[in-house]
Image (cartoon, grey):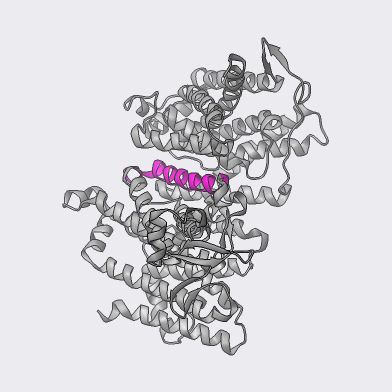
Amino acid sequence: MRSRYAPILFFSAIVIAVQILTFATGRQQYLTQLTMTGYYSLVIVGLCMLMGYAGQISLGHAGFFAIGGYVSAFLTTYDLTQLKGNLLIGFFSRTGLIVTVQDLYGGDALVFHPWMACIAAVLMTVLIAYVIGGPVLKLKGHYLAMATLGFGTIVYKIVLGTSFFGAADGLSDIPGFKLLPGLEVSGKTAVRIQNYYISWGMVALGMLLLTNLIHSRAGKALRAIHSAEDAANAMGVNTARYKLNIFVLSAVFAAVSGVFLTHYNGGIGPSEASIMKSVRYVAIVAIGGMANLWGALSMGIVLNFLSLRGYFGSYDDAVFGVILIMIMLFAPEGLLRREVFQGAKKWISGRGKAEGQKT
Amino acid sequence: MNIELLSQYLVAGITYGTIYAIVAIGFNIIYNATGIINFAQGEFVMLGGMIAVSLHAFMPLPAAILAAVLATMIIGALIEIIFIRWLISPSVLRMIIITIGISIFIREAALHVWGESVRALPYFTGTEVTVFSVGDVHISPQVLWVTGISAVMVMLLTFFFNYTLLGRQMRACSANRDAARLCGISAKNMVTLSFVLSAGIGAFAGCVVSPITYVQYDSGTGLAIKGFTVAILGGLGNSTAAIAAGMVLGILESFSVWVMPAAFKDVVSISILLLILFVRPSGIFGSVEASRLKEF
């Protein structure tokens, strides 16, 4: 029991330590990228669950991220004033699900409350993931890769070609997301520290959920599917159902981080749905060592942070391509194999260094 | 909708269909030899077009195309030798990820070499506005080049695989690798050859279509997805069916513009891909058993 929660406590301690460190060294601007890194890491741990534990590749996870982000962005910015007379809209606005905000020109606009938008986005994702996941997960190998790639491309083409999703410009001027009174997801400098904690709190929560899942009966079933699907099936594991549920779960992780990051950035563009993003998520999971949540998380933190800070310059995508090739050629089990990682964890915990620095 | 417009859409559909079919044949050659899908296939097409455009600055068009095809073939061979040849029975997932990595690498390299600008070779005969008319249907001569050259390529390939020793050796390897090796065929060389061949076909296709479709550092991805759709539609590994499937997809796509915005053209073809994958992964033309007999 202790060993299961220790990494999460350790992780939380690092999150706090990093915040204090940036405060002490006066590099508060790093918090912005760290916050974004947190949300991207959430997609990655979700995908790690699907790729590593259920053994299914998905080259379309940026699609789910975009569905979450776009649905929430659309609902919180689309002005419903013309529909005011509508009975349903009237009901929503009486119950506080629709709020009045100021639009760009100082007028009043009637939009959905972010909570409502967030829930709608997640429900939408669950629905799409179930519909797509059912037939997709019956496929294997190339077919599975291509089907998920196809799904990702469809989402990308749709957001790129639809005018009310802003076409190539995407959606902008998205209001902040007031989670609770005094707790708002937005990119304003005043709430930077608070947002850093929201983001990493979400990651910690996600990790808690996933580690519990891995150690549960379902987790054991998943690992059985990964190592030998037919054998697992023969032992009475409902492989199709487990795979589908994990697929939906990882889609929800992607969608939630899409919702939060969109409100944090105040906008979302079609590039978030692009295939390159999906490939990048896959690359990070592969480097982290497939069935290794903490490995995927730490690689996700390091690579996303470096990428967001612009260290790779115009070679950004190339870096991920080369990493993919190198890892798959020389270390297909991932850089942070379970044994290596646990060894390093023991070694590191003695020194109390930041999570990201060990790699 | 009148008959002229209908025929015009049909011509456009056949043109694009031919292009997709050529990319699909490239997929099939490597798939037959190795059992893997080379996700970098579209990049060969892009490289062929790009290199030819660059070389055309100092040499006549036929020489530039020939040199571009040869250069892409060498690149194809290098990719196989460096990344694939020495892997011992890699898993499908590993091969997918490696070839995706290669495709990203080539694309980014192309971005740094050629920049983001859109390029094209000149029309082989005449100019953009040259047309000749059959009744009320206007056809660009380049369309005839595309379909003609594709037809010749397919015929040459059929001849190669059926009547030459090397082609038969490749088929032997794809039918039964171990048995072929026992007969003294170097399976590894055959795999390299398959990469060379499909790189060459892709590059040549890239040159021929570039006046119509233009070429850009990232134009390979879209073509690869279309090519794969066609390969699946025809039944993976079956190149004759791929030609028919290419026509079907090209024409469907062309007519989809008539009922919905052109921006959703790709959505149509990918939806077809998903539908085929879900309902009939052996392809519309292949029976399940026939798809196991991997023949060109």
Q: Residue at x 57, y 47 (%)?
A: A163
Residue B220 x, y percent position in the rendering: 60, 41
In this view, B210 is above or below B43: above
Q: Is residue A109 left or right of residue A340?
A: right
Q: Kindly indicate the quadrant of the structure image that contains residue A90.
A: bottom left
Q: Is residue A352 left or right of residue B50?
A: left
Q: Residue at x 55, y 34 (%)?
A: B193
The number of discs equals 0
In this view, B17 is above or below B269: above
Residue B261 x, y percent position in the rendering: 56, 36
Q: Residue at x 64, y 68 (%)?
A: A311
Is residue B186 at least partly visible in the picture?
A: no
Q: Kindly indicate the quadrant of the structure image that contains residue B12.
A: top right
Q: Kindly indicate the quadrant of the structure image that contains residue A219.
A: bottom left
Most extreme residue toward the right, as rendered? B58
Most extreme residue toward the top, as rendered? B135
Q: Residue at x 55, y 26 (%)?
A: B17
**Magenta stretch: helix, strand or loop mostly:** helix
